[in-house]
Amino acid sequence: MKSTLEIKGLKAAINGTEILHGLNLTVPKGEVHAIMGKNGSGKSTLAKVMAGHPDYEVTGGDVLLDGKTILGLDPDVRAREGLFLAFQYPSEIPGVTIANFMRAALNARRPEGQEVDAVEYYNELYKKMDLLKIDRSFTSRAVNDGFSGGEKKKNEILQMAMLEPKYAVLDETDSGLDIDALKIVSHGVNSLRGPKMGILVITHYQRLLDYIVPDVVHVMVDGRIVKSGPKELALEMEKKGYDWVENLATV
């Protein structure tokens, strides 16, 4: 069995307009890959299609988790299969505390009638919060209600730590973060790196990759991956700009 997140010839459209044009990408477990691209290149569309957003129609190709297709599965089933998406703009859930939300998410992954032990749950939750340098009072707050951008992103990383997915997709996690929040979130992601998880970081800017150093960088143009390379590719992109890569894509 392949221990990879594999995207093969993926085509997807919204309202009849094709956004992804036969995209190919492979992220092995144990590696961190980054996708860079300017606005409109299809980065967030890719994340939403993988997660099963109903507004997008898959018109070709496949998405495989460890060799098994997830296309056609409901979003919650995809999550149970091991895919996690950290949203660019996380939703607010007033009245539901982070602790209760996280516990419900874990119970949803268990067989019907089986629930996580409360003592074990809080021990693990506090362990992960300490790892991520998150104050324990954080769990009593309603999910993302009145949160700053940095707090919302920290909450996403805490969810990722607790759910321990096989593959995590971080959609512009650096969006709206000041430098201090960026360092905290990056520390959280780096704390979770390891052989059991593949991570795909989607970003506009090279600055995030100073803190979450990728094994491989991919550049997306017009719904396709047009160039891949080592971490130094991000620095080359910053120096030469996206027009350079677009010119390569037309060669």
Image: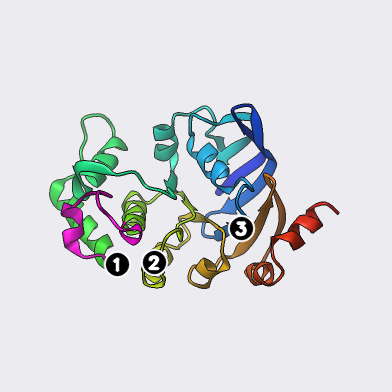
Task: Give the percent coordinates (x, y) of residue 186.
Answer: 42, 67
Q: Earlier in the sequence, mark 2 or mark 3?
A: 3
Residue at the image position 49 percent from the left and 55 percent from the top: 172
Q: Is residue 66 visible?
A: no
- Contact flag, marks 1 and 2 (Cβ < 8 Å): yes
In the rendered structure, which amino acid carries the disc numbered 1?
A: Leu
Region in magenta: 132-151
Q: Earlier in the sequence, mark 3 or mark 1?
A: 3
Residue at the spot of label 2: 191
Percent coordinates x, y for residue 33 in the rendering: 57, 59
Front position in the image: 26 or 204: 204
Residue at 45% over, 36% down: 78
Separation (CA) of disc 2 from disc 3 = 22 Å
Question: In this rendering, would 229 be left or right of 155?
Answer: right
Q: Secondary structure at mark 1?
A: helix
Cα–Cα gap, marks 3 and 1? 28 Å
Instruction: Give the residue displayed 34% in from the left and 56% down from the top.
Output: 161
Q: Amino acid at mark 2?
A: Ser
Q: Position of residue 168 (x, y in %)?
A: 46, 51
